[in-house]
Amino acid sequence: MSMPLEGSHFELWSNVQALPESYVFPPERRPGTDEILASKDIPIIDLEGIDGPRRFEIVQHIMKPSQNCGLFQVINHGVSRDLTDQTMRNFQEFFTLPAELKARFYSNDLNSSCRLYTSTLNYEKEDTHYWRDNLTHRCHPLEDHIDHWPENPPDYRNVVGKYSIEARKFLLTMLELIGEGMGLETGYFEGELSKTQLVSVNHHIPCPDPSLTLGMPEHCDPNLISMLQQGDVCGLQVLKDGRWIGIAPLRDTFVVIPSLQLRVISNGKLASAVHRVVTNSKVSRTTIGIFLTPSNDIEIRPADGLHGSLTPMYRGYTYKELFSRFTGNDCDAEKALGCFKL
Ligand code: OGA
Ligand code: NI
């Protein structure tokens, strides 16, 4: 049964036979047992030849899902299989370390430099908890943050450091392509708009009853852009035309989500996927998320120079303001963004 550590939001489970009451959702919010459609409708973008004549075509391929369900998959992304595998292995090993070695990272403080917690940022206030542990820390610039990272597994800092650099390159390339599709000048998203980089790793141990609970709530990501490296276990779902669609993990493939700040900067042209995570009863699931976020005090508003005419849909605000609305609204990013709609 659950043994929350004193003053922390990290639950240690041993031999959970039944889903604890605090994880059972009311019937209308349960994922249920309906069969979920497969992800064949979710485009896979091939970045091969991105610096040659295919570039224009690739931009068009990316813009379609970015304006439609707000999520797509990418192959030939430039990050080696060796590095993606090693990184996944390090995170998986981290989560299976004995509790004593993880204890120093358990924290309720949102500003903690490296934080391990259960459920969501909102653990204390939420009616029902999610079946999820999460490890999160900043990862850019590396030298400002790496000393706060786990030292165990012994390769963690080296491998996650390399991965952070490669993931950043990849996400900046995605932003560049999306910027081109929107008619923005080269380098528009570089600098303050994409300054903060977080790694956020979800870990879901096998769940006694996946039909009663969720691994992550239905949500939109509040940041600028997200990438996910799924392991080999299903769980991620996206809402498309009113139905949940499972995004089965594909080898060597990243999932990319243009998040809510891109919706604002594009003046509502880009969509941001509504997604959630379901659990399973058989195996642990680990997913690596890398999030780029504007720095706290830079003004965010619809970009000048977008294709098409422009009546701004949002007033300018800072990410700090948005984030405070986010935590004040049960981590509902959509609601938070509503505060800045014109
Ligand atoms: C997230 C997220 C999905 C996953 O961390 O915001 O949506 O598959 N993760 O873990
Ligand atoms: Ni998300």
Image: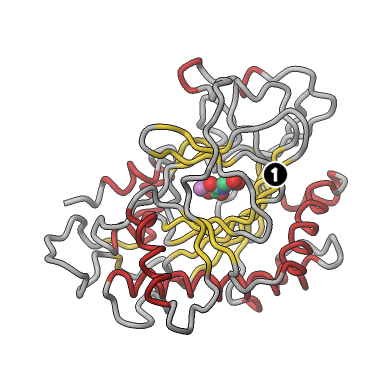
Q: Amino acid at mark 1?
A: His
Check the image and report above or below for 295 versus 4.
Answer: below
Relative to residue 123, is residue 326 drawn left or right? Answer: left
Say which of 340 and 106 sits in front: 340
Relative to residue 186, is residue 228 drawn left or right? Answer: right
Name the residue beneath numbered marker 1: 203
Residue 241: quarter of image: top left
Check the image and report above or below for 84 versus 207.
Answer: below
Indicate the position of residue 204 as horizontal and vertical percent values: 70, 39
Check the image and report above or below for 328 versus 271.
Answer: above
Identify the image quadrant of the N terminus: top right
Indicate the position of residue 111 as horizontal and vertical percent values: 56, 56
Residue at image location 79% in from the left, 31% down from the top: 13
Indicate the position of residue 151 as horizontal and vertical percent values: 81, 64
Q: Secondary structure at mark 1?
A: strand
Residue at image location 73% in from the left, 34% down from the top: 11
Residue at image location 73% in from the left, 67% down from the top: 81
Q: Residues within 10 Å of mark 1 (few under 14, many from 20)?
A: many
Relative to residue 336, is residue 4 drawn left or right? Answer: right
Indicate the position of residue 246 as horizontal and vertical percent values: 55, 39
Say which of 218 and 335 sits in front: 218
Relative to residue 43, is residue 262 drawn left or right? Answer: left
